Image (cartoon, rainbow, N blue to C red):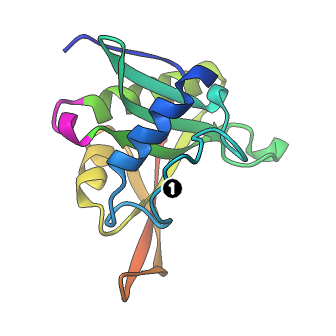
Amino acid sequence: MTVRVRQARLTDDSALAALDRRSWSAVAEVAPPREPGKPFFGTGQAPADVLVAEDDGVLVGWIKVVPATGLASNAHVQQIQGLGVDPARRGDGLGRVLLEAAVDVAARRGTRKVTLRVLSTNTVAQRLYTSAGFAVEGILIGEFRLQEADVDDVLMARWVG
């Protein structure tokens, strides 16, 4: 695997939008899939917040890591707010590569803690996060109603350093 992780660029927009549509999953997402033609970057999402994995120039994954809030008292916490891997590349270790790159970026930003939220239905992601040192800090029971069922929102975190 010759994957390189780098900071996203505005020129990645259409490739990221297409990758986001391909990687969408009903067990992992609370919002509907991205509409064709809708840009990846926009309100609340900028290239500076996103790392991409590329293999031989092709984008195969992405992860978004941002401050958890805008509060000074919470400045030591960064949050992962999305992770997508090309379905054809799942099982290749890209999720872990992107996750570790995001934690490294957060550490360079002076972060002491990285948090994330994952649906209880997304057991594959939960196993990845747990194996990467994230621990469950809380569960919001029935936080989402998806496909006629109540789904829990699992809050996880990893201390950095």
Q: Is residue 95 magenta?
A: no
Residue 151 sits in quarter: bottom left
**Viewer-proximal residue among 130 and 122:** 122
> Is label 1 in a helix, a strand or a loop?
loop
Residue 66 sits in quarter: top right
Q: Residue furthest bottom?
A: 148
Q: Is residue 88 magenta?
A: yes
Judge whether residue 78 can be spotted in this image.
yes
Q: Residue furthest right?
A: 72
Which stretch appears magenta? 87-93
In percent of width and height, residue 106 lies at: 57, 28
Residue at 25% x, 60% y: name it: 123
Q: Residue furthest front?
A: 37
In percent of width and height, residue 58 lies at: 34, 20
Residue at 53% x, 25% y: name it: 12
Q: Looking at the image, is 91 positioned above or below residue 136?
A: above
Residue at 66% x, 24% y: name it: 110
**Viewer-proximal residue among 23 and 102:** 23
Label tally: 1
Q: Quadrant of the N terminus?
A: top left
**Label 1: few (<14), some (14–19) or many (≥20) C-alpha neighbours in 10 Å:** few
In percent of width and height, residue 45 lies at: 66, 41
The amino acid type, in three-letter code, at marker 1 is Glu
Judge whether residue 161 can be spotted in this image.
no
**Viewer-proximal residue among 72 and 38:** 38
In percent of width and height, residue 89 lies at: 20, 34
In this picture, residue 108 sits left or right of residue 124: right
Residue 108 sits in quarter: top right
Residue at 29% x, 11% y: name it: 56
Quickly name the residue at label 1: 35
